[in-house]
Amino acid sequence: MTPLRQRVIDEIRLRGYSPRTEESYINALAQLANYYDKSPDLINKEELEAYFRYVNLTQHLSRATIAVKLNAVNFLYKYVLQRSFSIDIVLPKKAHKIPILLTRDEVHRLFLNTVSAQQKVMLCICYGCGLRISELLNLRVVDIEFSQDCLWVRAGKGNKDRRVILPKSAARRLNAYIAGFSLGSILFCTNWDKEKAIDAKTFSRGLKRAVARADIAKNVSAHSLRHAYATHQIEAGMPLHQLQKQLGHTSIRTTERYLHWLPEMAHSSHDLMAAWEED
């Protein structure tokens, strides 16, 4: 590891950034260094502008992905090199795509067609609580508070903790799962290591198999369950400010996107899986 790379890592950790941000910034700076075959601190303004033009024109990346690369360079200059930083680049226009939206019936069919008992519970928590896949996989047994009908998301996006309502139907399934499985501290652990969480690819593969068995002709991902939670709660009448807290959005404007995706609206958190009790 180069001294500069270590300095960047130290500064990121000192400022309390999430491990995911650390990985993204380090990767972005490594790609920049590889492009010019020299250390990022030796790359001048003109070279940076040329690099971002290249990325913008040839790599077909989203605005958000390019912004992460730009933020990484900005972090390097501001906090590590302590130099002024200003370059002229044009980011691609922000795409306004409507994500894959599942109906409540489709989510129920996914549940019915999920074979693994562990994956069934994971689907219930991901959908029933509106979690990101990274938040789901990072859950520990101690994060569940059955007596308070909630769970804690630790170091979610933006490295923030938040309290999330745990619906009773999901709590019952989760309680049975904890009682029936030999767990360590990790809630959704691998079969061979109780202190290692299963990875996102494993969950995604199980989800894809359930999609195929349920005959759902949509490109469903784990994040589709989070979108489904949000849209179904809005349809059920949850106030937008409460949904914002549940989802962990910093800005209410991010939550308001769901209103545009659901032009016709049908207020508290609703148990979206209450009718599944006999399945």
Image: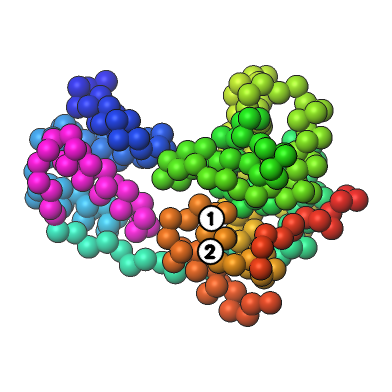
Q: Position of residue 75 (x, y in %)?
A: 23, 42
Does 253 appear above or below 169?
A: below
The residue that appears at 13% across and 35% down in the rendered structure is 81
Please state if 148 lies on the left or on the right of 52 as rendered.
right
Q: In this view, does 168 lie to the left or right of 1?
A: right
Query: Residue 166: horizontal and vertical position, in percent?
Result: 69, 47
Q: Quadrant of residue 267?
A: bottom right
Is 47 or 168 nearer to us in this picture?
168
The 10 Å Cα crowd at callout 1, few under 14, some 14 to 19, many 20 or more, is: some
Within the magenta stretch, is there residue 67? Answer: yes
Residue numbers of the magenta segment: 60-87
Q: Which residue lies furthest to the right in this view?
A: 278
Whole-number angstrom distance, CA of label 2 to CA of label 1: 7 Å
Measured as percent of width and height from the top left, residue 88 is found at 14, 59
Residue at the (75%, 43%) spot, across then down:
171
Horizontal arrangement in the rendering, residue 263 relative to residue 33 (left or right) = right
Number of dots carrying numbers:
2
Give, as a three-letter code, the residue at label 2: His
Q: Residue 241 carries which label?
A: 2
In the image, 48 versus 265, the foreground residue is 265
Badge 1 is on which residue? 245
Q: Which residue is drawn at 26% across and 38% down?
A: 29
Q: Does the magenta stretch include residue 222?
A: no
**Is 25 rendered above or below residue 48?**
above
Quadrant of the rendering where the N terminus is positioned: top left
Residue 115, horizontal then vertical, whole percent: 80, 41
Q: Would residue 32 be seen by someone viewing this image from the given angle?
A: no
Residue farthest along the bottom direction in this orientation: 264
* Prevailing SS of the magenta stretch: helix
Assess whether mark 1 and mark 2 are in contact (beta carbons under 8 angstroms).
Answer: yes
Label 1 secondary element: helix
